[in-house]
Image: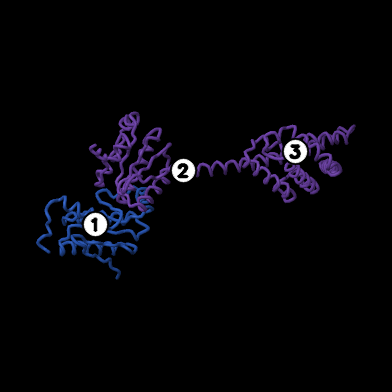
Amino acid sequence: MEQIPILKVGRCLLVSIQIDMHDKLALALQDDLTQRLVETRARGVLIDISALDLVDSFIGRMLSNIAAMARVLDAQTVVVGMRPQVAITLVELGLTLTGIQTALDVDRGLALVNRLIDAEGDDGAGGAH
Amino acid sequence: MAVSSISRTLDLTDKHHARLLTSWLESQVAAGSLRSGQIREDELKHQSQRFLQEFIDGLKSGDVDDITGASWNGARELLGEFSRSRALQGFTPSETATFIFSLKEPLFSLMREELKGNAQQLGEAIWTATKLIDKLGLYTAEIYQQNRDEIIKRQAHELLELSTPVVQLWDKVLALPLIGTLDSERTQTVMENLLNHIVKSGAEIAIIDITGVPTVDTLVAQHLIKTVSAARLMGADCIISGIRPQIAQTIVHLGLQLDVVSKATMADAFALALKRTGQFIGRVAAKPA
């Protein structure tokens, strides 16, 4: 079965979605990601959707869910690399993904996550490294 | 009855081809076809000659009730070509229609001469010819209108492109000065343009300046919000600037929630953008003398 790789980069987990999402895959991703968040005590999640040229309400909800789950596990979620066409479609659909941070690319996303984590003050993952 | 009047018309036009052409040209000139200087005399003559030939060919088919038929293909093509070129050259509709309608006078006077003393036949022939020429004239006007519509459509499109520039103000800062009313089609273009520029330049802040937007109603506000949301999804923040006092009042009266940082002037917005992106512009200290 297909699997979406989750990479640890510094204090963050990087998820790059490059294949079409469907129910099962989304559930598996949520499983894997929460698992890895607990294991690594990462403080941030970067979801790269630059390879997706179609984001529908299903993926929109999945992103919101992941962000909420990460929030519970004390991690910041940033969605990066959304294509202009995708952004327009989402806005037309009325999905503005409120509550999710966004950034133009992985670089900026990483910087943003680090800023958000620093803004929270405590570097909770300290003991794990 | 109709057949005899057609053959009579045909007979006349065929026999007096050259004379008809000359007097037709004269009446066109008299109607002012050359006055604007948009078409040269020899060109007009050439066009008239070609059309007259097609007109005669059409008459020969004997089918004068339906100019959409195959026998009038040549005439229709020519008329289409002429009115297209006239529409492009900026002729008025009446000037364009005059080309065909001015054929009536010489044709009728020719008929009067030839059919002198036979009022019955003359009446029939004139009726046939006038019906035919009216139809051709209407066809010309239609083609002219179509072409004008196309020109207007193209200009609207060009205007759309011209009126949505995205300007790079500074590193990571874009400006989008909006001029004119925002409708949904323009919003779409503006949005696409802005988002593509955000990707290309890696901007983090986009300043949307609405100084040139005459009124902000609920629809315009909704379009602005859409643009801001789309930019946010791409990871860029928006600042709306250029809100005139009147517009500020309107926004409040309408109870609109823009949910975005807004500034009165572009300068204020730019200062905020610089601050947010951690950049600074300062005055060079004067060197001590």
For this orientation, the residue located farthest to the bottom is: A1
Q: Colour of chain A?
A: blue
Between marks 3 and 1 in the image, the one whose residue lies nearer the viewer: 1
Q: Position of residue B58 (x, y in %)?
A: 77, 47
Kind of residue sitting beneath label 2 = Leu
Q: Is residue B260 left or right of residue B137?
A: left
Marks 2 and 3, how far apart at CA: 46 Å
Please report contact status of discs 3 and 1: CB closer than 8 Å, yes or no. no
Marks 3 and 1, how far apart at CA: 78 Å
| Corner quadrant of residue B4 | top right
The 10 Å Cα crowd at callout 2, few under 14, some 14 to 19, many 20 or more, is few
Q: How many marks?
A: 3
Q: Chain of mark 3?
A: B
Q: Colour of chain B?
A: purple
Q: Chain of mark 2?
A: B
Kind of residue sitting beneath label 3 = Lys
Kind of residue sitting beneath label 1 = Leu
Tell me the quarter of the image containing the C terminus of chain A.
bottom left
Q: Position of residue B70 (x, y in %)?
A: 72, 51
> Of residues B168 and B84, which is closer to you in this image?
B168
